[in-house]
Amino acid sequence: QENRLRKYLRHPGIVPKSELLNWSNYSEKGDRVLDRFDKWFYSIKYDGYSAIWTGTKLVTANGRQTVYAMPQRMQDSLTAISTPLVGELVLVQKSDATTYETKENLQAVVHGGRALSAKATSVAQRLVFMVYDTPSTKLRQLTFEKRTEELGRIVGHLNAATDHVELVKQYSIQENFK
């Protein structure tokens, strides 16, 4: 069971909660499987585009595409942060939009370059950058828990509704599955 769980935990910040709930039972030895994951975390997985704030510009995770279309508040918030950030670019979905429409609109914004259609420009105003880690060599030396605390200090005061940038909440497996 532990090996099955580990395959889902390639990144300790992203853990499927449904899988943890299924495997939170007891092993043959009588100890809980999850007791061995005392320093592990999980978070909500957002469906969008992986992106990196380099400290000067926002690029897709593969580095091939610079994201130019973003709300002014997001641009202002990110420009004030010199620490590189890793996150997910997501669209706040309108209540009447389908998932396909949302994904299609997000692709238009990310791949649109500097010249966007009027629709893509309006869609870009719903962009949110959900931060979950940093590629900073200085911060990568810290444990994930300490790094998350430091990210909270850097971007914790921002929120998706007003600044279009928000830190993804990390949950401790030990604290939530006792």
Image: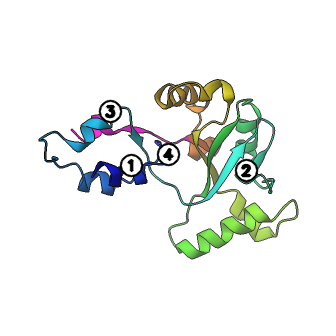
* Residue placed under numbered mark 2 in the picture: 71
Q: Earlier in the sequence, mark 3 or mark 1?
A: 1
Q: Which amino acid type corresponds to the residue marked 2 in the rendered image?
A: Pro
Q: Which amino acid type corresponds to the residue marked 3 in the rendered image?
A: Asp
* Residue placed under numbered mark 4 in the picture: 11
Q: Nearer the viewer, mark 3 or mark 1?
A: 1
**x 40%, y 39%: residue:** 41
Is residue 35 toward the left or the right of residue 132 in the image? left
**x 54%, y 60%: residue:** 47
The region drawn magenta spans 167-178
Marks 3 and 1 close (CB-CB < 8 Å): no
What colouring does the structure picture have? Answer: rainbow
Horizontal and vertical percent position of residue 110:
74, 61
- Binning the other alpha carbons within 10 Å of mark 1 as few (below 14), some (14 to 19) or many (20 upward) gives few
Is residue 112 toward the left or the right of residue 95 in the image? right
> Does the magenta segment cover residue 124?
no
Q: Which amino acid type corresponds to the residue marked 1 in the rendered image?
A: Arg
Q: Earlier in the sequence, mark 2 or mark 3?
A: 3
Q: Earlier in the sequence, mark 2 or mark 4?
A: 4
* Vertical arrangement, residue 150 with respect to residue 95, above or below: above
Task: Indicate which disc residue 38 carries.
Answer: 3
The CA distance from mark 3 to mark 4 is 15 Å
Q: Earlier in the sequence, mark 3 or mark 4?
A: 4
* Residue placed under numbered mark 1 in the picture: 6
The CA distance from mark 2 to mark 3 is 39 Å
Q: Secondary structure at mark 1?
A: helix
The CA distance from mark 2 to mark 4 is 29 Å
Q: Is residue 100 visible?
A: yes
Q: Nearer the viewer, mark 1 or mark 2?
A: 1
